[in-house]
Amino acid sequence: MNRPNLTVAICTFNGAQRVPKVLERLKLQSTSLQIPWEILVVDNNSDDDTEEVIKKYQSTWDCGVPLHYKREYKRGLGFARQCAVQVSRAPWVGFLDDDNLPAENWIECIYNFQQEHPHAGVFGGRIKGVYEVSPPKYFERIERFWAIGGGGKKICYTSSSYPHRRKRIYPPGAGAVVNREAWLAFVPPSLTLQGRSAGKKLPGEDIEAFSYIRNGGLEIWYNPSMVVEHLIPKERLRKDYIYDLMWRTGLSRYYTRRTAYSKREYMAMAILFWFNDLRKLLIHLFRKKDQEEIVSTAEKLLILGSLVSPILTRKSEPLSLSSKWIQKDAKNEQSYS
């Protein structure tokens, strides 16, 4: 068989009910081009029947695209994605989580972008949220932390003409495509951040990995033609989940900032980061209360986590959300589910 141009890696944990939806969507990929690609399901050491479900699919798989299965015994999304890159035989690896449904032209859009930008290190696309229940009011202010968003204009985040280049902006890991050679050359075998289910239980593994690739001198792109639907179950819109995600995202910023910049740059900017976080927190604390308390509190937790991240992330396990400050702040808010 010819070497594939692209490996679509579906990283999953206990996704026996979710992965079939992704596979069915991939079956629908339509293109007039002869694009050699393959599918790789990376089972992140599930304890449900994910493996049996995939093997059953393999036994009846007839869509002309190879379907592979690999178990990664170290839990954590960072480990699963590292496994996908190492196992892949293609020069490009596209990441899908088990709740990501790509548009029917997703593969063709990836291929066309590759041809236009062969030296890109990472490129991602537009992520549309599909919610099981309506999100809280003003959720659009924080939806990017659920890997949702993107406009209609193609952007090179590393271009000297991009006005926000120094902010080190990246596409979400979900739906992103990476240059395999660049990943193997610049991303360490074990990331500091491995996702909320492993290690320090902090998100940001995609930002950390992409920062290494960017520091290697490669381009980082946003391509709006690559569209993926992100299924958001009601459990991920509960108040406790929202608060925990934002808190831990804030705590991860010590690592993502330290990785994004050289040691000298980070040392020079650390005080600026701290004062900027403090300024934002004070603005939130003294702002008049309104009807957006869930999102407002989530934003405060993000800033507070970022503010204390250089101290707390040195512990083996970050501070949980049981602190009196958070309990007091959330005490009178309505539950959301």
Image: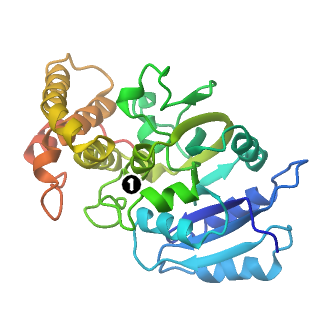
Disc 1 crowd rating (10 Å Cα; few below 14, some 14-19, many 20+) is: many
Residue marked by disc 1: 205
Left or right, residue 121 beside residue 252 = right
Q: In this view, does 64 lie to the left or right of 310?
A: right
261 vs 52, left or right, is left
Q: Which residue is drawn at 78% across and 45% down?
A: 105
Q: Where is residue 284 in the image (x, y as percent from the top left)?
A: 20, 23
Name the residue located 53 percent from the left edge and 34 percent from the top edge: 149
Q: Nearer the viewer, residue 302 or 65?
A: 65
Task: Classify mark 1: helix, strand or loop.
Answer: helix
Hey, what amino acid is under mark 1?
Glu
Can residue 137 be seen here? The reply is no
The residue lying at 75 percent from left, 64 percent from top is 4
Residue 214 seen in render: yes
Where residue 289 sits in the image (x, y, percent)?
Answer: 22, 20
Residue appearing at x 17%, y 46% in the figure: 309
Which residue is situated farthest in the right direction here? 32
Q: In this view, does 33 lie to the left or right of 137?
A: right
Asked if 91 appears above or below 128 in the picture, the reply is below
Q: Where the N terminus falls, by quadrant? A: bottom right
Q: Nearer the viewer, residue 298 or 78?
A: 78
Image position, residue 94 (x, y; %): 62, 55
